[in-house]
Amino acid sequence: MHHRVVGIDCATEDARIGIALGWVTDGVLEIDRALLCNKEQSAARTIAGWLKEHPEPTLIAVDAPLGWPSALSRDLQTHRAGAALPTQANELFRRETDRVVKRQVGKTPLDVGADRIARTAHAALRLLSDLAVELEAPIPLVWEHTVMEAAGAIEVYPAATLASHGIRATGYKRPNQVEERKEILRALAEIAQFPPDLSPFEASADALDAAVCLVAALDFLLGHAVPPEDQQLAEQEGWIWVRPRESKKRRKV
C-alpha cells in the first residue's frame, strides 16, 4: 500500500491554514513537510502543486466539518421567524458523528450548526472546490479505506485523534506553548516518521495540527477508524474518521 497524504488544518483565512504532506507506505507514515499558508501561497494552489508533482492515490484529511446536521436542514426548510423549532438543541445543532466521537474518545466537536466553526466549514468546502479547479478533477469524499485511485478527502478532528492515541490534546495552541507542542511531537514520533527539522511543528499549532491530520489519515487507511452505522446519514452530514481511544494513556517521553 502506498498513498500520498495531505493534512489541512482549516481556517477562514489562508494566513491561518496549516498544511502538511506525507506518504503512507506499507502502513508506515512518513511526514515530509508542513507550512503555514498566506495570500501569496494559498492553500489550494500549494496543495495542487504538491499533487501535480507526480500522480498517485492521495488522501486529503481535512480538519473542518464538511456537512451540517440533517435535523437542522429539515427544520429550517419550513421555519418562520418567531416560531419555535420542534427539535431539541443538541439534536438540532449536532451531527451523529459528533455524538460518536464523544462516545469513542471523550471529545465533543464544536457544533457546526450553532458555532463559529460553521464559517470554517464553509471555507473548507470552498478550499476543496478551489483545489478541484486547480487539479481539473473532482475530489470526492472517501468512505472505504481500501478504495483509493485518485484524490479523495475525509473529515478529521486532530484533538480526537490525539486523544485516541493517548496523547495530550489540549493546552498547546498558544504561541508560547512550545514545550507542550514538543511533548506532543515526541509522542507522535512513536507513530510517524518526521523530517529532521521540527521547527515548523514546534512554532505553530496550525502546522502541528496539520501533521496530526496525517496521523488521522493513517488510521483511516489502516482501517482503524470507526465507520458510520448509517451510511446515508453520514453522506448527508459528514463523518469524522477517528479510531477508538486507547485504554491507557501513552507514556510521556
Image (cartoon, helix red, strand yellow):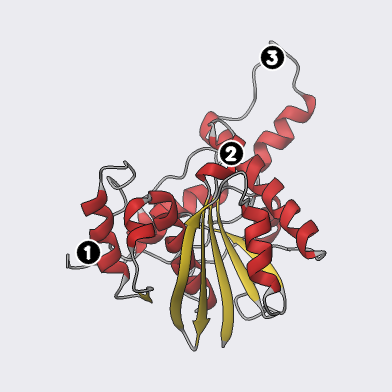
Q: Quadrant of the N terminus?
A: bottom right
Give the labeled residue for mark 3.
83
Q: Is residue 52 above or below residue 170?
A: below
Q: Which mark is drawn over residue 64?
A: none
Is residue 186 at all visible to an observer of this figure? yes
Does the residue at mark 1 contact the one at mark 2 (Cβ under 8 Å)? no
Q: Nearer the viewer, mark 1 or mark 3?
A: 1
Look at 54% across and 43% down and name the residue there: 15
Is residue 99 toward the left or the right of residue 3 in the image?
A: left
Give the labeled residue for mark 2.
12
Look at 22% across and 64% down and name the residue there: 249
Does the residue at mark 3 contact the one at mark 2 (Cβ under 8 Å)? no
Dividing the picture into quarters, in which one does residue 101 lie? bottom left
Q: Is residue 236 above or below residue 32?
A: above
Give the labeled residue for mark 1.
249
Q: Nearer the viewer, residue 237 or 189?
A: 189
- Give the alpha-carbon distance from disc 1 to disc 3, as whole Å: 47 Å
Q: Position of residue 154 (x, y in %)?
A: 60, 62
